[in-house]
Amino acid sequence: MRGTGQDEAEPLVHRVRVVVIGAGQAGLSSAYHLVRRGLAPHRDFVVLDANPAPGGAWLHRWPALTFGAAHALHSLPGFPLATPDPDEPASDVVNRYYGAFEREFALPVLRPVRVLRVESEDTGGHVGPLRVTTTGGTWITDVVISATGTWDRPYWPYYPGRDVFGGRQLHTHDFRSAAEFTGRRVLVVGGGTSAAQFLLQLSEAGATPLWSTRRPPAFTRRPFDPEWGREVEAEVSARTSAGLPPASVVSVTGLPLTPQYRAGIDAGVLVSRGPLAGLREHTAVFADGSEEPIDAVLWATGFRAALDHLAPLRLREPGGGIRTDGVQVAREPRLLLVGYGASASTLGASRAGRAAAMAAMDRLRDLAPRPEATGTLA
């Protein structure tokens, strides 16, 4: 089974040793390392991707987000990215790069296939395989590597009056072009890099942006070098190891004080009005009691881990997160999480893919030989 649909004569249930969910950076890295460790594509494992084309979450980024303005994209294993045109849309660069990677290593990516749920096949005290139910059939598997990221779970915070505001509201997830807001007063809510980029683009497009953050913007002059990356990952890992939800990216990393951002501060664009208290029909009310007329609200308030498909496994800890040790899930040894917590960055995702492949192989070695497949996957 190589396409997106399935032949009518083909069984709906398939048996493989590993199912990878998601074909973003973490999922593709996992698949690459599974092949390197001897698993046969399609016969032994598959990658199920809900997107219609390669690119992961990058496929959905707004066209004005160029590669040069995006977060650094680290190379996938064994396949250097080279030097793309910094003015090319990031979505185009990553679509082309991920697609070439999939072809180069003949990875068994099936798309568009959306995973609906993952359940245990345990019976009578016997630990069985996992059942992965999708829009394209069912897979019975020994190990699941979940690499679904966050793009499908935009976070919309509650504020008084959000339901009575008469202007347009949209999330980072739905942003396409600053030119849509020319001549409008736009409130951008959020303290991350997406918010800063939106503010600059809106100003350049002839809109009047206003910025609201819960805390003063965390600009930092510290270089985002490998040592910084290790410290960030350690801080995020401490939360997930304790079963707490991952913190927001900016709360850990801060905002790099680039020349572009410095110019935005000097121009008065990247200056926060402080916390938002609420909305009225045509105005924003700030915590200091001031009000401003606005036409639209852009919620640059981040994303949450897209893990609804894992709900049947009951993995949540009292603290609200999923307790992990690296990529291992404490409550479910058959499940490995990549692109979650410390591995949500592009650098961490590639390393986590290797760790997940190694952990999957360790798990498979502990199991009995694989039963004969019930479906044709090649």
Image (cartoon, rainbow, N blue to C red):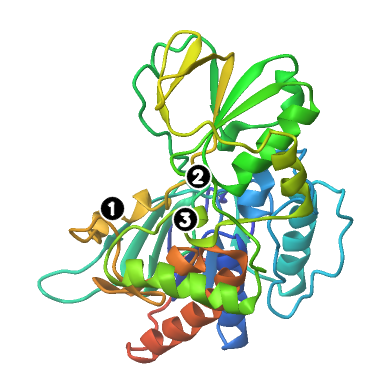
Please tell me which residue is depicted at 54% across the width and 52% down the height of the picture.
218
Amino acid marked by disc 3: Ser
Pointer 3 with pointer 1, Cβ within 8 A: no
**Residue receiving disc 1:** 311
Picture coordinates of residue 239 (x, y %)? Answer: 34, 66
* Nearest to the observer: residue 263 or residue 255: 263
Residue 377 seen in the figure: no
Rendered view: 41 above or below 365: above
| Disc 3 to disc 2, C-alpha distance | 11 Å
Report whether 120 appears left or right of 47: left
Please tell me which residue is depicted at 62% across the width and 54% down the height of the picture.
56
Residue 262 seen in the figure: yes
Q: Which mark is residue 216?
A: 2
Q: Secondary structure at mark 3?
A: helix
Amino acid marked by disc 2: Pro
Q: Which mark is residue 251?
A: 3
Picture coordinates of residue 178 (x, y %)? Answer: 73, 28
At label 2, counting other C-alpha atoms closer than 10 Å, the crowd grade (few under 14, some 14-19, many 20 or more) is: few
Please tell me which residue is depicted at 28% across the width and 53% down the height of the picture.
311
Quadrant of the frame with the N terminus: bottom right
Amino acid marked by disc 1: Ala
Tag in front: 3 or 2 = 2
At label 1, counting other C-alpha atoms closer than 10 Å, the crowd grade (few under 14, some 14-19, many 20 or more) is: few
| Disc 1 to disc 2, C-alpha distance | 36 Å
Picture coordinates of residue 256 (x, y %)? Answer: 65, 57
* Nearest to the observer: residue 345 or residue 116: 345
Rendered view: 217 above or below 343: above
